[in-house]
């Protein structure tokens, strides 16, 4: 079987790390199976969908390394939905309803109060042609519901009807269709609801695996009935846990801060974001993997946990730092150049400082320390001044290499009598202005003799 998955965002906002989870799971799953993933924009909601968001979604996915071969927009596929809806109507599986949201809400409350399940009672099925004509004459327009196959002799005798599937992630799933309301498939204004458009696309495009968030489990039961009514073969279904932050705040609220755009602007590595999005809520360590191939090898649908996928946004820093510490110079050369690091020292500079960077951008701070040194004159006590004095007198001639630091400070130690912290801290502060940082043995040749002399 040729695996074909899809990622189906609505272009109503920017992608955040929680949306990246299904995107990557689908992409990696298809990739591992030698298959493909379609990017499908669920944009039938004209009022909320925006072209700029559709473009931003493609850009954000490309940043992660997801480059779908095919992308489609539901807006371009309306004729397919027209035909499917017509088929359901002809089969008597779609019926017009006229209730307003208020009326439905009142009825729902009455049902609850009477101890009945708060589901739609199919009242509109009882309307005669005259009733409907009268309602339309009042100016009401119909929305259309799909008649779920959950009844015996008549639609008013609902009975337990199990929708079953072997979920790729959650295992055997059973949902009683009699516990659900007939879904609205066509809105009052004639536009189609995702419930039907998604089935038509999945069916027509030959999607083999529908993998999405667990908030869609009930949809799946309904959609299986629609797949069957339309004569499409069923894809396999999988529902993954949703990413949430540990403080319990939903991702939609935090979506600004955790949008892929913002994370990119803040200088996070795409693979740190990707690793966190996929490995949270899955058995095994949450580690930063260096490329999507490696992440694909870690993806195991059966290892996705049944409980929630909570993450601490601070984890991103840890994963990012792990990646940055191992990045070779080629991976960052452009970024170093734009931070003003001259090409001829860029590689040794990067190797000296990467272990002290959480983000690649932090290298710019270390470059300031190398090039400019202290931003204000550090205050030194008598003992420190003695160390610096000896250091200046004993500064060896160039050329310098990684061994220069050891021989120089050895000589300073002998001359001043200072050792350990009392020896090294005044030198570090005088040279860089900071009390911590990369190995001075590696920085010293980059700072060079002239600048060193001027700082002592
Ligand atoms: N547009 C839907 C969503 O973003 C797609 C769900 C699905 O994958 O079927 O939730």
Image (cartoon, rainbow, N blue to C red):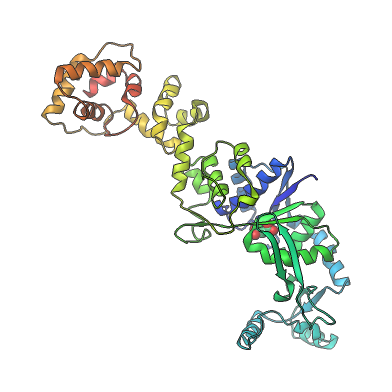
Residue 242, image x, y percentages: 57, 57
Residue 316, image x, y percentages: 47, 46
Q: Residue at x 14, y 20 (%)?
A: 416
Give the left or right position of residue 392, taking residue 235 as reference.
Answer: left
Query: Can you name the residue that lies furthest to the right here?
Result: 90
Give the left or right position of residue 315, taking residue 171 as reference.
Answer: left
What quarter of the picture does the N terminus occupy? top right
Give the left or right position of residue 245, taking residue 447 as reference.
Answer: right
Residue 426 appears in the rendering = yes
Q: Quadrant of ligand 1?
A: bottom right
Location of residue 152 with respect to 375 vertically, above or below: below
Q: Residue at x 52, y 29 (%)?
A: 331
Query: Can you name the residue that lies furthest to the left here?
Result: 382
Q: Residue at x 68, y 79 (%)?
A: 119
What quarter of the picture does the C terminus occupy? top left
Q: 311 or 255, which is in the foreground?
A: 311
Residue 69, image x, y percentages: 72, 42
Location of residue 161 with respect to 19 vertically, above or below: below
């Amino acid at each position: 079987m040729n695996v074909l998955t899809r990622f189906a965002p609505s272009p109503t906002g920017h992608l955040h790390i929680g949306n990246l989870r299904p995107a990557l799971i689908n992409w990696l799953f298809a990739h591992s199976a030698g298959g493909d993933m379609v990017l499908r924009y669920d944009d039938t909601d004209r009022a909320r969908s925006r072209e700029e968001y559709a473009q931003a979604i493609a850009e954000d996915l490309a940043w992660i390394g997801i480059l779908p071969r095919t992308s489609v927009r539901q807006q371009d596929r309306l004729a397919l939905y027209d035909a499917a809806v017509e088929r359901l109507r002809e089969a008597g599986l779609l019926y017009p309803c006229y209730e307003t949201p208020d009326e439905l809400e009142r009825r729902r409350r009455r049902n609850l109060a009477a101890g009945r399940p708060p589901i739609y009672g199919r009242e509109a099925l009882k309307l005669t042609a005259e009733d409907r004509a009268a309602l339309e004459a009042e100016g009401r327009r119909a929305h259309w519901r799909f008649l779920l196959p959950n009844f015996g002799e008549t639609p008013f005798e609902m009975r337990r009807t199990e929708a079953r599937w072997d979920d790729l992630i959650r295992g055997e799933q059973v949902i009683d269709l009699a516990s659900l309301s007939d879904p609205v498939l066509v809105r009052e204004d004639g536009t189609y609801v995702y419930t039907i458009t998604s089935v038509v696309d999945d069916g027509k495009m030959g999607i083999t695996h529908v993998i999405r968030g667990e908030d869609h489990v009930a949809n799946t039961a309904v959609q299986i009935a629609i797949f069957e009514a339309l004569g499409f073969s069923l894809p396999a279904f999988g529902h993954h846990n949703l990413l949430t932050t540990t403080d319990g705040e939903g991702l939609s609220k935090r979506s600004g801060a955790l949008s892929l755009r913002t994370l990119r602007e803040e200088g996070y590595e795409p693979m740190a974001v990707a690793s966190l999005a996929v490995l949270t809520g899955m058995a095994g360590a949450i580690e930063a993997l260096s490329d999507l191939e490696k992440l694909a090898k870690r993806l195991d649908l059966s290892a996705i946990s049944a409980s929630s996928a909570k993450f601490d946004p601070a984890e991103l820093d840890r994963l990012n730092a792990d990646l940055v510490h191992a990045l070779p110079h080629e991976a960052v050369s452009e970024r170093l150049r734009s931070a003003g690091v001259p090409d001829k020292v860029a590689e040794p500079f990067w190797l000296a400082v990467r272990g002290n960077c959480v983000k690649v951008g932090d290298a710019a701070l270390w470059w300031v320390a190398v090039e400019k040194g202290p931003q204000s004159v550090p205050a030194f006590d008598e003992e420190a001044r003695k160390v610096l004095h000896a250091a200046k007198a004993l500064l060896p001639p160039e050329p310098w290499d990684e061994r220069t630091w050891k021989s120089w400070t050895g000589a300073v130690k002998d001359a001043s009598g200072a050792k350990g912290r009392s020896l090294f801290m005044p030198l570090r502060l005088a040279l860089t202005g900071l009390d911590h940082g990369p190995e001075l043995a590696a920085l010293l040749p980059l700072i060079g003799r002239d600048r060193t002399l001027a700082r002592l």
